[in-house]
Amino acid sequence: MRKRKIDSDLKQNVGSDWKWLDIEKLAVVEVTSEDDAFPIESALLPGEVSGWRASGPGKQIIRLLFDNPQRLQLIRLCFEELENERTQEYVLRWSPDGGQSYREIIRQQWNFNPEGATSEIENYQVDLSAVTILELSINPDISERNTFASLKELRLG
């Protein structure tokens, strides 16, 4: 059995002092849609606070196509929902070969509730070398209601 101890203090240790990649300089971003008032750069660039939101309901994809293969050690995802109760599912995966094949990093569901659980912050410690594409697929509501996908923050280190 091969195993490792997880750093339980990772959420506290990841902050403004972490060396995040400059996605704006390193990758092209593809999105299935975006609300003009909440463009994708609002979730990817430091200092932005509004985050990204889709222009229509249903499943959405955010894809980062790196100019050169990148080594990733940390992936931070932040989601926020202040108004609707819903169960969101997302899948984060990566490709080492320009999209010919993909490897799943995480598939996760989260229950948002305006009465308490309004945000989800996940820090994934990874050791991925030669990442050419990183893809986040979001199903904003597994009940298939007309809900809009959103992403408060995506950071890579």
Image: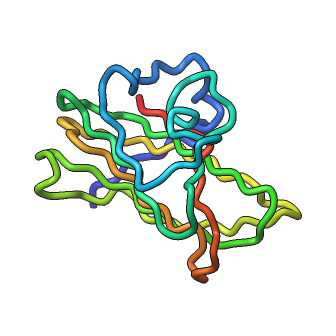
Q: Is residue 118 above or below residue 128?
A: below
**Residue 78 lies in quadrant:** top right
Q: Residue at x 24, y 58 (%)?
A: 103
In front here: 133 or 109?
133
Q: Residue at x 56, y 78 (%)?
A: 142
In front here: 37 or 71?
37
Q: Position of residue 76 (x, y in %)?
A: 51, 40
The colour scheme used here is: rainbow
Q: Position of residue 109 (x, y in %)?
A: 56, 68
Viewport quadrant of the N terminus: bottom left
In front here: 97 or 63?
63
Q: Residue at x 34, y 53 (%)?
A: 3
Whether residue 40 sits left or right of residue 15 in the image: it is left
Q: Residue at x 28, y 55 (%)?
A: 2
Q: Position of residue 131 (x, y in %)?
A: 22, 39
Q: Position of residue 99 (x, y in %)?
A: 16, 52
Q: Is residue 48 above or below residue 135?
A: above
Q: Is residue 19 above or below residue 107?
A: above
Whether residue 63 sits left or right of residue 49 in the image: it is left
